[in-house]
């Protein structure tokens, strides 16, 4: 396994620079400038969605990239790099890591996660595979089928976990993940404050990914609006 990515991001902040069609900042140029801001602040990596965003970010910053392609398929809830088609595109775009949905949900092509991982490992032996997990069972399975990195990306973002937050019960989920994982764990998903990011690292995570709290100004503004409602 190529450890350059892991060495480069150890103990640091990876900033997810993403905006989908329909979001106010939907623009590869803006995502690239977000990445510049992240780098100037001291971030050690970028997480990005789509080939054009990955390419655009590459033009502006030299940080390692966790690449994904979000794609909706009918009759499947899996949308983060769901099939080999998107995985090939992310690899061709030059991302050091490709992150894929590692939940037990039915994949659009009906493949098992183990088959997907085996195919990726054969075709792209130098690319690291990150398991975007939502539950402890996802993590256990991801370890078994041969992922390189565990991510908590989907915890709080699936039907099964939608009311949950990574910091619930003093980071119980994250502690459980760290206790069973021989693989590096990257904390990601609803890390909304610097304190939560610091805590995730203090608990032993290899790195931490923060998205919306840094790069989604509409989400940030909404949190202010929510907090001031009824203040007077
Ligand atoms: C669930 C999902 O689709 N997560 C996506 C995965 O790449 C992104 O939209 C998130 O922004 C990213 O994971 C960082 O998480 P948060 O924005 O919560 O800090």
Image: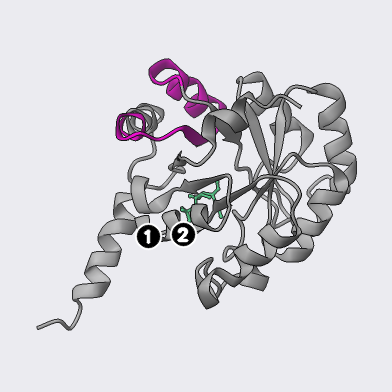
Q: In the image, 23: left or right of 204?
A: left
- Above or below residue 11? Residue 86 is above
Q: Quadrant of residue 21?
A: top left
Image coords of residue 225 (percent x, y):
23, 68
Quarter of the picture containing the C terminus is bottom left
- Above or below residue 136? Residue 147 is above
Q: Give the alpha-carbon distance from disc 1 to disc 2, as whole Å.
A: 6 Å
Residue 46 is inside the magenta segment = yes
Give the residue at the far left of this rendering. 232
- Picture disc at residue 54: none
- Picture disc at residue 195: 1
Image coords of residue 220 (percent x, y):
30, 57
Q: In the image, 145: left or right of 25?
A: right
Residue for point 76% across, 39% down: 83
Quarter of the picture containing the N terminus is top right
Residue for point 25% across, 59% down: 221
Between residues 181 and 68, which one lies in front from this camera angle?
A: 181
Q: Quadrant of residue 155?
A: bottom right
- Above or below residue 94? Residue 180 is below
- Asked whether the beta carbons under mark 1 and mark 2 sit within 8 Å of each other, the answer is yes
Residue 101 visible within the image:
yes
- Above or below residue 134? Residue 205 is above
Q: Could you say whether the residue bearing mark 2 is in a helix, strand or loop?
A: helix
Magenta residue span: 37-62
Between residues 23 and 90, which one lies in front from this camera angle?
A: 90
Image coords of residue 200 (percent x, y):
51, 57
Q: In the image, 31: left or right of 7?
A: left
Within 10 angstroms of label 2, few (less than 14), some, or many (20 or more) residues?
some
Residue annotated with mark 2: 199
Q: Could you say whether the residue bearing mark 1 is in a helix, strand or loop?
A: helix
Between residues 33 and 186, which one lies in front from this camera angle?
A: 186
Residue for point 44% across, 54% down: 197
């Amino acid at each position: 396994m190529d450890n350059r990515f892991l060495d480069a991001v150890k103990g640091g902040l990876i900033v997810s620079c993403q905006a989908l069609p329909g979001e106010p900042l939907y623009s590869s140029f803006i995502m690239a400038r977000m990445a510049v801001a992240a780098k100037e602040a001291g971030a050690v990596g970028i997480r990005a969605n789509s080939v054009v965003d990955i390419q655009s970010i590459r033009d502006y910053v030299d940080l390692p990239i966790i690449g994904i392609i979000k794609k909706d398929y009918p009759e499947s809830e899996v949308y983060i790099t769901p099939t080999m088609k998107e995985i090939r595109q992310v690899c061709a775009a030059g991302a050091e890591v490709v992150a894929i949905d590692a939940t037990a949900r039915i994949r659009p092509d009906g493949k098992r996660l183990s088959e997907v991982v085996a195919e990726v490992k054969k075709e792209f032996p130098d690319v690291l595979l990150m398991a975007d997990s939502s539950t402890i069972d996802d993590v256990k399975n991801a370890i078994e089928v041969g992922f390189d990195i565990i991510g908590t990306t989907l915890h709080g973002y699936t039907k099964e976990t939608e009311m949950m937050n990574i910091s619930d019960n003093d980071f119980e989920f994250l502690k459980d993940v760290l206790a069973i994982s021989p693989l590096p764990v990257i904390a990601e998903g609803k890390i909304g404050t610097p304190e939560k990011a610091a805590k995730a690292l203090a608990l032993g995570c290899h790195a931490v990914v923060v998205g919306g709290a840094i790069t989604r100004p509409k989400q940030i503004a909404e949190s202010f609006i929510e907090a001031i409602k009824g203040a007077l």
